[in-house]
Image: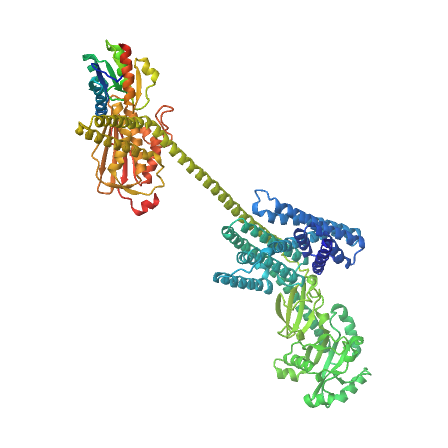
Amino acid sequence: MSVSLKNKLVLVVDDEPLMCECLVDIFESVGAKVIQAFDGISAFELLKSNKVDILLSDIRMPGGDGYSLMKQIGLELNYKPMMYLCTGFSDVSVQDALAVGVLKVFDKPFNVSEMLDIIFAEVNKRL
Amino acid sequence: MKILKYILFNLVFALIYFAAAKLGLSLATVNSSASPVWPATGLAIAILVLGGQKMWPAIAIGAFAANFLTPSPLVTILFITIGNTLEALVGSYIFNKFSKKSPQFLENQSVTVGIIAASLIATSLSASFGVLALIYSNSLVWAEAGNVWRTWWVGDLLGALVVAPLLIAFGSSSKSFKIPKVSLSQVFLIIVSIGTLYSITQIIFFSSNGHRFLFLVFPTILLFLVVYGQLGAHVLTLFICAMSVVFTVHNNGPFSGGNLNHNLINLQLFLAAVAVTTLTMIGFKKSGSLRLPGIVLTLSWALSGTLFYLFHENQAAKDQTYLNNIILESEINIKSRMSSYENTLLSGVSLIGSSNRRLKVNEWASFLSLLKIDQRHPGIKGLGTIWPVSHQDLIKYESKIKSEGILDFQIHPLPNHDSLAEAGKKFGNHYIVTFIEPLKSSLSARGLDIGTEPNRRLAAELARDTGVPHITSKITLIQDYTQRPGFLLYYPMYQIGKPIDTVEKRRSFFKGWVYAPFVADEFFKGLLGKYSDQVDLYVFEGNNTTSEALVFESGTKSNTATTKKFDLTTKIELSKRNFSLGWKKSNNFISSFDTTTAWVGFCGALVSLLLGMIVVILESVGRRARVIADKKTHQLEEHEMKMLSSARLSSLGEMAAGIAHEINNPLAIISVKTRSVSSEVILNFANKGKILSDLEKIDQTVFRIAKIIKGLRAFSRDGSKEPFSLIQLSVILNDTLGLCAERFKTSGVELRISKIPPIEIECRGIQISQVLINLLNNSFDAVRNQNEKWVEVVIKAQNDNWLTIKVTDSGPGISIEIQDKIMEPFFTTKDIGKGTGLGLSITKGLIEDHNGKFFVSRESIRTCFVVQLPILQSTEQKGAA
């Protein structure tokens, strides 16, 4: 079954615009609607003003890193999107990430098909 | 076969030992078996050292044979043989012990010390055996034992010290002997050394009083050591010792004259000093350069040599004064004796002149018996009268005297001279001895015409003409059958009351002479009085001291073997005749020379050696310290290198996370974009623009990664051995920022870089990168948790070849107390485990390697580090770095 994320709202967060552009491309290619933010703070604003289904964030960012964002979501957001972290370096342990509700931590560079499969599987699980 | 060789060698060495022993015995003076120098000892020790202790039979045989020919009983000879053999065995044993295993503190002096120790101990054995043996055979009494023991011991010791080292050195080096090539400067040195040797030999041995210049020997040995090496020094020592001994044995040279015992002690002290000096200097040479100890030694010798000279002169002056006093006294004695002779004659003159009538012969005889001249004036052979008689009156005179009672009176001439007739024809008169008493010793003189012999005639006439007593020149008295030199003393008589103030008046009023014959021997005997055994007197007639003119020699006979060189020559006038007196100190001369001067010299030589030894030890200590310091420095340098690399690593570790992140991000982008391009291709190139744009982004991203990798270069190598090269400043900055920028961005620290001057700087790029990374990291750490977070880098290139880089951060400044300390290694204000504090001191080192300056700016309230670098290195700077 090919991956499809139609009708899902995806928020990609990375301080590097080119990286965001790649992620937007990836999710748009499987039919999702994608919005992007370049730091944790503006990402949280977007989460409040949009019902985001899937959140994919980089960890190391100035202006609020991805890990704090996840924690903040758990504490302050009234809903919980599917949360994924991307990391260029394992500066957060997997246990800590899972403890705040992150579903999976992807290491950069990541295998796009694999990543999509995992997300798709999770989406199906929730149906 | 081996046994044959063994026996042969033993016999050969025994023969050599025998020869050496005979040589030593020929120098025996104190006791027929104890010599002042015994070279055989040195030979024996050398034989056993070189040939092995198994050669002891050679010594035993040689010693036995040598002593066999001395007048000693067999037991004595056996004892002495055992003593000599033991001496060689013990001496070689001790020497071997020292030369094999030398204690650390002795180092190269061990051979010297070994020879000295071996000599001292072994020789005392031999001396003890020898003395005991001699006492046992009653050749020696206990009272003399001490003296003989000392002579024996010192003789053997000197033989060992002088001969053994030379032979051992020669024996051990002969294997590697080759003719060395000689350069011009060496030829010059050889000429100088031979000239020096000739000069000092002349000064010391062949001139009078050479003793005071003995210290010249020491620098000569040093010179020979420098020019000819160890063997040369040994040979010279042997030469000097041999010369000294030979000259002294022949009562010549610097150790002769005066007390024999003192001379021997002086000689031995000198030989010991020379031998020890040679050995010690060779030790110095072995342990390093001779230059500094040589200078110290020469200065010290100059000092002690001067002291020695002054001591010597002082004592020589005292001796001279003493001798002068003796001479003065003796001359006074001589003059007074002659005076008394003249007075004796005068009493005769007075007797004759006191009455008008002629004196009768028996009156003369009683006069003389009263006078008792043989008791009072032992030299005078008799007292007599001489009357001038004209030739015509000769026969008449004879008869007249005969008739007065001298029945056997017969006028006769002196044998082998003019006959009476000839004399009468020549001179017209005769001088006849008429009275002479005591008769029994002078019978042949009565009736003698002394006018027939020119010397007698001349002196008589001089006396007559001058009115003053005269003596003849040296003659042989007619009454002396031993034909010793003698004189006649004439006292002229004149008619009483007549004026005799001119020669003519004296001749006209002349009556005759009272005269006395005397033998020179008996005249001068005993005139030296209490000094007769301390001084030898030689009396010569006239002004020359030729052997024909010799009239008298006093005889301690200790100077017979020498040339007749006198310590002093004086002149004296006795009864109008000149005599030359030669004075010589005999062996018993109570010289103020004791052995003090020699001991002063000996101690001076030893002190010089001690000073030299101190210098050598200091030098070797210094050398060792330098070796240790060099090693430590080397270790330190290695350690520093290790710390540098560990600092690099820790710096790298700090940034590893950031670098990994920086690389992974672009990789992810490349991966995604590649996938995107693939999908577009699959979709049949529909969106060409997107494909091209994606591909370009891939390309850019690749270079992004490459930049980061380049930045890693800063950590790949140490960089300190790399040459300086011209590098674009911007390249260095980009490398640095490629590594650091990510961290800054992630943590929200603003990194402000001023405009980079577009210049090339001559440097080691890697090291400059390391410096900048270090500074940026430090600043980053300082501000990451502050409210205000920024780091500013300002780069300015000035016209005077200086590039200034200022790294300022928003952190608080560095307090004054810490400002100086922060450049020190290991100083850190970070918590334990965070940062090693190495960075700034290493940074400083790296900048200084570039001839630049690194310091904390005092103008900024914030923390501001300033790096100043020369844009172009000058050639010297490059060399220095």
Residue B286 drawn above or below residue A123: below
Quadrant containing the N terminus of chain B is bottom right
In the image: residue A96, left or right of residue B101: left
Toward which corner of the image does residue B447 lie, by quadrant?
A: bottom right
**Residue A53, how many percent across, how many down?**
23, 13
Toward which corner of the image does residue B736 lie, by quadrant?
A: top left
Residue B495 appears in the picture as rendered: no
Quadrant containing the C terminus of chain B is top left
**Residue A36, how many percent across, how many down?**
20, 19
B12 vs B612, nearest the viewer: B12
Toward which corner of the image does residue B317 lie, by quadrant?
A: bottom right
Residue B370 drawn above or below residue B236: below
A81 vs B19, nearest the viewer: A81
Residue drawn at 23 percent across, 33 percent down: B794
Residue B575 appears in the picture as rendered: yes
B514 vs B261, nearest the viewer: B261
B482 vs B452, nearest the viewer: B482
Residue B640 drawn above or below residue B181: above
